[in-house]
Image (cartoon, helix red, strand yellow):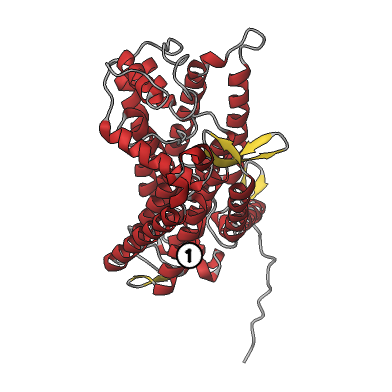
């Protein structure tokens, strides 16, 4: 049969272009860009989103309040030689804290897990040193002098507890909650830290325990085990109090050694008892002002002078008479300047921080980022609530700074680090609930951080 040969014609290649650039080149450039973005965010993880705007807003508002109110509360420190010295020192720490926030919010939260135990170990060493060779501040051995700077290890220990507990609870997650080993390990770490902060400040000890209990609940601990942990905390604190009271009973009987007793841990115990007794007795405007009730009386005068709308920033009357107006009692100056309305709005800012953290945590499919952001938010808000409770007279007198606002470099830097970690979780930890995003996140995470978030709102992988 005759065969028909078909001549092949050269194919015509049609090149589609966009603005004169071939589509193939655009596709290749896009692929390279996506690959780089994926690597920068950790493996196959989705590209990071911007830091949460609500957390940023709350943080920046607190910085604004801090600058304005510290200038008002530090009026008695002002001298003719350098009027702005107190404000400048405070602004330097705020700027350093902002730098920490900007750096931390760009780090993947996995980095904080890697350094959690090292950070906790350093905090423990600092706590041991401050108990042995600390500098006395307001009657408590809380500070270390390093190259002319004062460091307060209890402030650092608070953030260390959050980091370590987030790691332990995330790595010991089980379908019905936290494993028994995880509970024992977490509670043991808290008790060790509390034992080292106990003689320096009862309020710090209570704060550490409160933050840890909140993280236990967020981590999905069973209610029965949660009650057992509370009982262990109470029993441990009671045992320490009894041992210290028994071992130093002779010191309490010796009136000549009163001054020496006030300078050691037992002296702090006597101070706690006296403060609680004075708090229960209360104060009255007709009471005579003494060294024991001066702080409470002046704080109440400042708040009464503020009224509903306040006297205006910089018009504080009591800042020149109130001891520690720029640190432990700055909230009373805020109320004097801005009134009840301003004080209530400031409290709402801290509460909104917890609410926003809870919202973000519910969108984290993994346990560690959820625990980390909630732990940081609870730490900041609880410390603010304790400060406010002390100033308004709900709690006994104790030294506790108002986060970002009170004067104190260690507190500002530590709380700034917490905000940076929260923003990091908002950038790298949240997802829209799609299974593809969660699978990509799992591929980018180490095996010990792949436990599911018990509070996740969505479909688990």
Q: Indicate whether 131 appears above or below 100.
A: below
Question: Where is residue 16 shown, x and y percent of the image?
Answer: 61, 51
Q: Residue at x 56, y 42 (%)?
A: 141
- Nearest the viewer among 312 and 450 is 312
Bin the neighbour count of mark 1 within 10 Å (Cα to Cα): few under 14, some 14-19, many 20 and up.
many
Q: Which residue is rendered at x = 58% and y = 51% of the image?
A: 127
Residue topped by disc 1 = 168
| Identity of the residue furthest to the bottom in this view | 1
Q: Position of residue 65 (x, y in %)?
A: 46, 24
**Which residue is located at x 49 percent, y 48 percent?**
199
Q: Tell me if residue 61 comes above or below residue 251 in the rendering.
A: above
In the displayed orientation, state which residue is furthest to the right.
Answer: 147
Residue 89 visible from this viewpoint = yes
Q: Does residue 23 show up?
A: no
The image position of residue 446, as x and y in percent, is: 56, 67
Asked if residue 404 is positioned above or below residue 308 in the image, the reply reads: below
Disc 1, SS: helix
Instruction: Classify residue 234 as left or right of residue 263.
Output: left
Question: Where's the C terminus, which quadrant?
Answer: bottom left
Q: Nearer the viewer, residue 163 or 408?
A: 408
Query: Is residue 183 depicted above or below 161 in this figure?
Result: below
Would residue 72 be found to the left or right of residue 153 on screen? left
- Figure quadrant of the N terminus: bottom right
Task: Tell me where residue 268 appears, x and y as whole percent.
Answer: 46, 43
Residue under the point 64% across and 46% down: 133
């Amino acid at each position: 049969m005759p065969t028909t040969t078909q001549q092949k014609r050269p194919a015509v290649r049609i090149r589609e272009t966009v603005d004169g650039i071939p589509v193939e080149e655009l596709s290749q450039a896009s692929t390279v860009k996506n690959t780089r973005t994926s690597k920068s965010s950790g493996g196959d993880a989705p590209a990071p989103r911007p830091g949460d705007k609500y957390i940023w807003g709350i943080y920046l508002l607190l910085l604004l309040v801090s600058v304005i109110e510290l200038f008002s509360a530090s009026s008695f420190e002002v001298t003719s030689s350098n009027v702005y010295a107190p404000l400048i020192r405070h602004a330097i720490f705020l700027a350093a804290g902002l730098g920490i926030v900007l750096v931390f919010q760009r780090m993947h939260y996995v980095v904080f897990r890697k350094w959690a135990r090292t950070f906790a170990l350093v905090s423990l060493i600092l706590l041991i040193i401050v108990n042995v060779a600390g500098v006395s501040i307001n009657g408590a051995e809380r500070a270390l002098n390093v190259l002319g700077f004062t460091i307060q290890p209890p402030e650092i220990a608070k953030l260390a507890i959050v980091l370590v507990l987030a790691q332990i609870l995330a790595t010991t997650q089980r379908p019905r909650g936290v494993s028994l080993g995880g509970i024992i390990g977490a509670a043991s770490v808290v008790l060790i830290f509390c034992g080292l902060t106990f003689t320096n400040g009862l309020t710090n000890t209570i704060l550490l325990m409160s933050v840890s209990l909140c993280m236990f609940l967020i981590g999905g601990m069973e209610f029965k085990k949660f009650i057992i942990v509370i009982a262990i905390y109470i029993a441990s604190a009671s045992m320490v109090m009894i041992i210290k009271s028994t071992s130093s009973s002779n010191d309490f009987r010796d009136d000549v050694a009163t001054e020496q007793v006030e300078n050691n841990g037992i002296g702090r115990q006597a101070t706690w008892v006296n403060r609680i007794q004075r708090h229960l007795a209360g104060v009255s405007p007709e009471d005579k002002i003494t060294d024991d009730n001066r702080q409470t009386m002046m704080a109440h005068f400042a708040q009464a002078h503020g009224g509903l709308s306040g006297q205006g920033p910089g018009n504080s009357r009591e800042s020149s008479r109130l001891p520690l107006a720029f640190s432990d009692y700055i909230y009373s100056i805020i109320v004097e300047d801005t009134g009840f309305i301003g004080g209530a709005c400031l409290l709402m800012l801290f509460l909104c921080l917890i609410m926003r953290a809870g919202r973000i945590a519910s969108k984290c499919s993994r346990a560690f980022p959820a625990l980390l952001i909630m732990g940081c938010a609870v730490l900041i808000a609880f410390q603010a609530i304790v400060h406010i409770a002390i100033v308004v007279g709900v709690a006994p007198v104790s030294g506790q700074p108002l986060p970002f606002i009170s004067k104190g470099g260690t507190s500002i830097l530590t709380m700034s680090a917490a905000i940076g970690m929260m923003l990091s979780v908002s950038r790298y930890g949240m997802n829209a609930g799609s299974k593809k995003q969660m699978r990509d996140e799992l591929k980018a995470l180490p095996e010990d951080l792949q436990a599911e978030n018990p509070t996740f709102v969505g479909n688990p992988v």
